[in-house]
Image (cartoon, grey):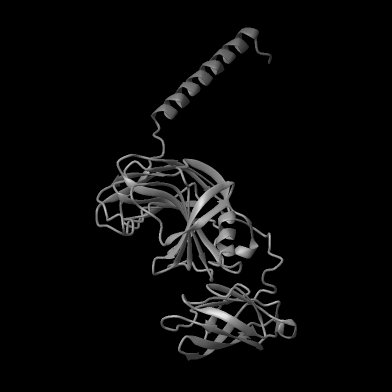
Amino acid sequence: MRSSPRRLRTVRALFGSLLTALATLATLLVATTPARADTTICEPYGSTVIQGRYVVQNNRWGTSAPQCVTATDTGFRVSQADGSVPTNGAPKSYPSIFNGCHYTNCSPGTSLPAQISTISSAPSSISYSYVSGAVYNASYDIWLDPTPRTDGVNRTEIMIWFNRVGPIQPIGSPVGTASVGGRTWEVWTGSNGANDVISFVAPSAISSWSFDVKDFIDQTVDRGMAQNNWYLTSVQAGFEPWQNGAGLAVNSFSSTVNTGGGDPGGPGTPATGCQVTYATSVWQGGFTADVTVKNTGSTAVDNWKLGFTLPSGQRITNAWNATLSGSTGAVTTSPVAHNARITAGGTQSFGFQGTYGGSFAKPSGFTLNGTACSVT
């Protein structure tokens, strides 16, 4: 049976009224449904995840005074920062956001730790909001270690100071300037007793910037404070407050680490297991070291490179059966023609002579083509 034109018009009118009612209901639902609430963290080491990929952490470790951070959709703000600590010492906290791993807390889906030699680029961006009436820096914290560790303190810390307010300064002493990422930075180096620190300090405040973290890592390697077979474990951005700090904010943050670029001069065949025997003969002011590297894996290792860091005060003066890159601090050992392969279960040996000041100590860690070795 055919419907009459009048009946069709009636149905259309009813359908139109229904659509109007549904649209009105949807508008009311949107207007009355609350947005996702920001998350406030007041526990000293409390953290939360934003964007499904970054960790926001309160990280209050240098004071018992209350501190809270409020995580937003794109960053965080310091919502409470009571108390103060002396400006000639360490800050009271490091509220921050990070990509990677920090004391076993790893951000979701991170590609870190990643060996430096495999990183082609590490683009990052940041937008800060600053406040008056506080003493603080705004800084990145970039952590490097000879091993792909996800816990504890790393060997070298890179700091990028975007801003500093008050009578504070980086760890160590100034060693000159450097051009990185198209900007000029004052460079400081030193140690806080637990790890080495290199700081790049902006001459004036930077409120936002997009750059490549790898440029700062390369500078650190060039200065002998890391090496290409080490690992990048985290990229962090936040604030170190000494006095107050409420209102400081990271408005937005991004961090990506692209791997696969490789390093033509880097390690060869990956090692799956290794053991190092480090035998020394020591006299006042001098020493020799005989080093044996054992491949405990099931396949041969070609073009091997053994990485280690000499304790402070030690310097290598000559070597045999190997070529050494670096004579102090971070050292990379490469084979000569006759010992370029370590067979499965086999060993290769080399040695060197050096000088030292103070008390003598042995290196605490070794890596074979990026793999951490046991030490005997």
Residue at 68% from the left image edge and 63% from the top image edge: 262
Name the one closer to the observer, 328 or 244.
328
Q: Name the residue at the right extreme.
A: 337
What is the quadrant of the N terminus in the image?
top right
Name the one closer to the observer, 371 or 219.
219
Q: Can residue 309 be seen in the rendering of this structure?
A: yes
Please tell me in which quadrant of the rendered image residue 112 appears: bottom right
Q: Please give the count of numbered marks on the rendered protein.
A: 0
As displayed, is residue 279 above or below residue 96?
below
Residue 68 drawn at (x, y percent)? 31, 48
As displayed, is residue 37 above or below residue 67?
above
Residue 323 drawn at (x, y percent)? 66, 79
Q: Can residue 105 be seen in the rendering of this structure?
A: no
Residue at 60% from the left image edge and 10% from the top image edge: 9
As displayed, is residue 185 above or below residue 301?
above
> Going by the image, does 334 lie left or right of 73?
right
Residue at 55% from the left image edge and 78% from the top image edge: 366
As displayed, is residue 47 above or below residue 369?
above
Please tell me in which quadrant of the rendered image residue 70 appears: top left
Residue 353 drawn at (x, y percent)? 57, 85
Residue 159 drawn at (x, y percent)? 47, 56
Please tell me in which quadrant of the rendered image residue 60 appears: bottom left
Name the one closer to the observer, 157 or 188.
188
